[in-house]
Amino acid sequence: MTHQYSCSACAFEVHSDDDDEIVELVQNHANEYHDMSPSDDDVRDGMQTV
C-alpha cells in the first residue's frame, strides 16, 4: 500500500510503498531543513494512504 507524507512547513513530499523508507526520509528532512527530530510514531501518524 502506498503512503505519502507532506511537510507542513515547506513543499517537501514523499511517496513510497515502504513505510520505513518514508520515516527515514522525513526524519532526515526535518532534521536538516527544520532542526526538528520527529519520532517514528510522529511520522507514521502523519502518513496518508494514496
Image: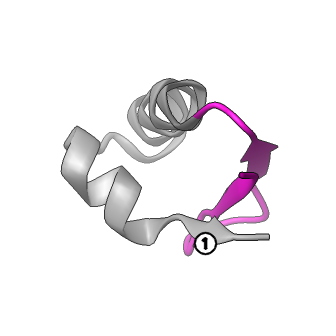
User: In this view of the protein, can residue 38 be seen by the observer?
Assistant: no
Left or right of 10 in this view: 46: left
Q: What span is colored magenta in the figure? A: 1-18
Amino acid type at circle 1 is: Gln
Q: Residue at x 68, y 65 (%)?
A: 10
Label 1 CA crowd tier, 10 Å (few <14, some 14–19, many 20+) = few
Q: Residue at x 37, y 53 (%)?
A: 43
User: In this view of the protein, can residue 10 be seen by the observer?
Assistant: yes
* Location of residue 13 in the rendering, given as x and y in whole percent from the top left corner: 76, 55
Residue identified by numbered label 1: 48
Colouring: one colour
The foreground one among 14 and 11 is: 14
* Location of residue 30 in the rendering, given as x and y in whole percent from the top left corner: 45, 42
Q: Residue at x 58, y 25 (%)?
A: 21
What is the quadrant of residue 5 in the picture? bottom right
The foreground one among 8 and 16 is: 16
- Counting every numbered tag in the picture gives 1
Q: Residue at x 80, y 70 (%)?
A: 50
Q: Secondary structure at mark 1?
A: strand
Vertical placement of 15 versus 19: above or below?
Answer: below
* Location of residue 19 in the rendering, given as x and y in whole percent from the top left corner: 53, 37
Left or right of 1 in this view: 44: left
Vertical placement of 27 versus 6: above or below?
Answer: above
* Location of residue 42 in the rendering, given as x and y in whole percent from the top left corner: 26, 58
Left or right of 26 in this view: 38: left
